[in-house]
Amino acid sequence: MKLQVTQENLAKALNNVARVANTRGTLPILANVMLKTVGTRLTIAATNLDIAITHYIGSKVGEEGSITVPARLMQDFVTSLPSGVIELKLDDYKLHITTDQYNSTINGVSAEEFPVMPAISEGKSWTVPVKDLKQALQQVLVAAGTDESRPVLTGVYLHSNDGKLYIASTDSYRLAEKEFMTTKEDIQLLIPASALQDLLRLLSDQDDSVEITHDDQQVLFKVGEVELVTRLIEGSYPDYRKLIPTSFASEATLSKSDFVNITKVSSLFARESAGSITIHLDAEQKQVSIKSIASQLGENTASATADVVADGSITLNSRFLLDALGTLSADKVQIRFNGKLEPCVLQELGGDDYTHVIMPLKS
């Protein structure tokens, strides 16, 4: 293998793929990235057996070939080099990296030992605008579970219903659902949230669309010169729609920035009580107030002007509330619920395509 690439392109590719290389796995080669020439391009790939990312970059190929090298070393080294042309030359299993000022050798391992994710041969394909997918992921990933003993909840559920495509996640304490495009396809995919976190980092505003291809076991995302493939999670996703109330006894609309401010201040006094804060809607005073008590430190009540339709109180986790408010982009937001023990729903004023539900705490 002998080729020339630019430092900028190689560093970008390594930064995109190296994060999935697994240094703690039982297979040492999973800590490597694979470099392989394909026509006039160089592919850089890494996998942890659940997720694989491949980045294609243009190169001037003199001799074809392939090798795997330690991901962390290769990434850190190339990132440290000055911009310009880098020459890569493979001699036996040693990769020689040469620039005007640097001459280095990295010991590699044969690419034949590198595991490759099986190709999706008979899958369905469709495209999604990058900006829509990016916004949807930013809004729902926050609610995905991290408890590996409940693997279904560590996934994000991408599914079609009545001609619309929805993406949803829940950790059983909160729930986020986004409606983000129309579709005629029947889609039911349970995708690991960790893979979608990696996909979100890869999505660039310069790209127009993401091509999604899937079968019963895997899903492949193609965006620009990058491909991410991940195994799907097996199992049935809970019927989360039953958790979303359709009518409400208590309701208020207020400025998002005011709501964030009073929640942040109240959360400081809620650290002792696992983030517990009590929200009160007052129609007569036209305000939303949040009370938090720290038995050792004191207590706090913070209020904001609001359009309150009906009074009510509910106790929530302050971190969950701040996470939810962080996913809303409108100036005005709505908070609605049915008593202290029922789910609390947050939405943007006039926007019903995104719903965030938080389960109450027992006050």
Image: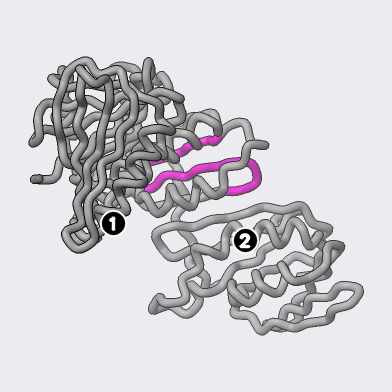
Seen from the viewer's position, the closer of residues 302 and 251 is 302
Q: Earlier in the sequence, mark 1 or mark 2?
A: 2
Residue in the picture at 27% in, 53% down = 269
Tell me the kind of residue under disc 1. Thr
Quick check: can you spot residue 350? yes
Q: Which residues are magenta?
A: 210-226
Residue in the picture at 38% in, 38% down = 260
The C terminus lies in quadrant: top left
322 displayed left or right of 314: right
Dot 2 crowding, Cα within 10 Å, few <14, some 14–19, many 20+: some
SS at circle 2: helix
Seen from the viewer's position, the closer of residues 18 and 247 is 247
Residue in the picture at 22% in, 51% down = 299
| Residue 47 painted magenta | no
Residue in the picture at 49% in, 57% down = 52
Circle 2 residue = 15
x and y, in percent, of residue 203 in the image: 57, 43
Circle 1 residue = 146
Cβ–Cβ under 8 Å for marks 1 and 2: no
282 w.r.t. 257: above or below? above
x and y, in percent, of residue 158 in the image: 34, 35
Tell me the kind of residue under disc 2. Asn
Seen from the viewer's position, the closer of residues 197 and 251 is 251
38 displayed left or right of 315: right
Dot 1 crowding, Cα within 10 Å, few <14, some 14–19, many 20+: some
81 displayed left or right of 215: right
